[in-house]
Amino acid sequence: MKLFVDIIPLFVAVPMAGAFLIALVARKIKWLPALITNIITIGLVFVSFFAVKLINIHKVLVYDVGAWKPPMGIGMVLDGFTVFMLTTVNLAAFFVAIYSINYVERFTSKWKFYTLFLFMIAGANGVVITGDIFNLFVFLEIASIASCSLIAFGTEKHDLEAAFKYAVMSGVGSLFILLSIVLLYSYTSTLNMADISNVLAQKDPNNIILMISALLIMGFGLKAGLVPFHGCLPDAYTSAPAPVSAMLAGAITKSLGLYAIFRIFYNVIGMNQALSSIFMFFGALSMIVGVILAIGQWDFKRLLAYHSISQMGYIVMGIGLGTPLGILGGLFHLFNHSVFKTLLFLNSGSIEYATGKRDLQKMGGLSEQMPVTSGTCLAASMAISGIPPFNGFWSKFIIIIAAVQAGRYGYAFLAVLASILTLASFTKVMKYAFFGKLKDGANSVKEAPFLIKLSMTSLAVICITGGILLAPGVYEHFLKEAVDVILEGTKYSSVVLQAVLK
Amino acid sequence: MNKTNEKGMSLIVKTITRLTVGIMLLYGIYIISHGHLTPGGGFAGGVIIALSFVNLMLAYGKEVTLKKLPKGVASFFEGMGAILFLGIALLGFTGGYFFFNFIAKGEPFRLFSAGIIPLFNIAISLKVGAGLFAIFISLVLLKIEAEKK
């Protein structure tokens, strides 16, 4: 037991060690940074799978950093929700790392890319695994700053503008979060999340909690890119190199925004009817506004960025419902979205790699020249539009059923509507990019290199077979554990504090 | 730091800088090494050390300073500080925990006490000092390149 607990800090320590090593040693040797990054990401995927197994046996594991017991010391908490997010983040990071080997060739100073990439993974893993709210803020900043510099990686004019926008918006978000942490700390005199929940339960309701909740929703909403706060994301996704957009959409906004918001509201502060309505409202708003903005876009990556906002809306609406089925649908959609949106961004990058174009009107007929990209993009498009048997269908279906069961017919209708509009806009993508007549001068276009194809194909396979996670025998081990943690609500505190004493 | 160098500020500034730079450096080292006893620590001490080099650059220009502490060396120290910090934290696994204080803690309020805390301070000061100096160098070099255009 003791031996296995030691894997918990490795999720943060190993990517950080890799990043420092690359910056110190591997900058002179061309092939070493990519090798180190890929070894680390593949290792993290295996450790995540191992952690899933560990949680099936132990339910909750708490690691005392430096042998100081929480709530005095800093604790790292591994439970169902955490391992679910770790698997999602590290899986996306793994495929993006394979893809980057070929893709990053066209940039100078590759080692900088890999250093920042590993920092991004370390930050995302750290946010997910920590049990201390200030520690969460620190990791959040690590991930935000790393992603901000990665958005600017091309150092063209529009890259820098997008990065500056992202820096301002995410800085404002961080300030809101920091202020809410300050207020929480002054009110409860503790920073450990389980202990905060414990103290809050003993105090009478106070208006300060409303203030803290509002600040947290604004702060994490900015990180997640929900609709009233989405201003910087389309630019950032469009300008960043394709692997970075894929990481931002597939892992960073999810762990920094959604994970943190649901962990804090469900497990620390405690959910109520008003908060649930707020989440559902923001979710539905993001869903509809995102997809309506997406449908008119001609820039492939910008279209994907607005769809990303729209799909985040589904997740927030599903989990905001608060019923077991809604939470299941939301979490499953989070995993699925991470897979197919990563794949779509990688597809856009592969088209850009081969043709140098992002404008859908200037593409056309690429399916003959680029069969793998075309096929995987078709799979991902079907998954995101919710066509059976792709994984996106199951999660959207569950969310809609859950909304109907809870008597929220309006929200169910909006979810169906957004899904139809998504289908429409991806029909447009397929028609303009891959089918139709080949444009002049596109005859010499070649399919992307092997590793890019490998990464895209593996993600497409997950898209097709993703529904298997709902099958009996698999469901209990992965999704149910995560749903249980959210459903247990503020009992989280007693569960964690008891696990400390073990 | 020869007096005949034409670049940089006036003789008065150069002389004063020459006299004070060593003291600033020493003070930075003092703050770092007493980080676990008195206010201050790795971050504050690292900033003071970086400022001593920044001061040198302001008074003497970039050639003299970059000869004393080249860009490559600064970036090496930055990486080294981070690796040291993480290395000490990982060495805690010898005592069973990440970040475990595995060295004997000694007598309180003595210079050699508190186990790994002074070592962490040194690692942080390397990272912060070299990092801050590197930021200053990049600002200076970028400005010169912008003027060339």
Image: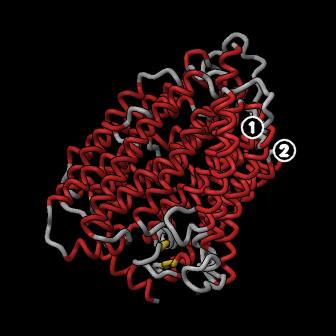
Q: Which residue is mark 1?
A: B65
Horizontal and vertical percent position of residue A355: 70, 22
Q: Is residue A426 visible?
A: no
For mark 1, name the chain. Answer: B
Residue at 59% x, 42% y is A343
Q: Foreground residue, A478 or A301?
A: A301
- Left or right? Give the position of B86 relative to A467: right
Disc 2 marks a residue whose amino acid type is: Lys
Disc 1 marks a residue whose amino acid type is: Thr
Q: Quadrant of the N terminus of chain A?
A: bottom right
- Left or right? Give the position of A148 relative to A439: left
Q: Foreground residue, B69 or A435?
A: B69
| Disc 2 from disc 1: Cα separation | 25 Å
Horizontal and vertical percent position of residue A388: 47, 47
Asked whether the beta carbons under mark 2 and mark 1 sit within 8 Å of each other, the answer is no
Is residue A450 placed above or below A196 in the rendered structure?
A: above
* Count of numbered tags: 2
- Which structural element holds mark 2? loop
Residue at 41% x, 26% y is A295
Q: Which residue is mark 2?
A: A28
In the current view of this chain or complex, which residue is farthest to the top? Answer: A440
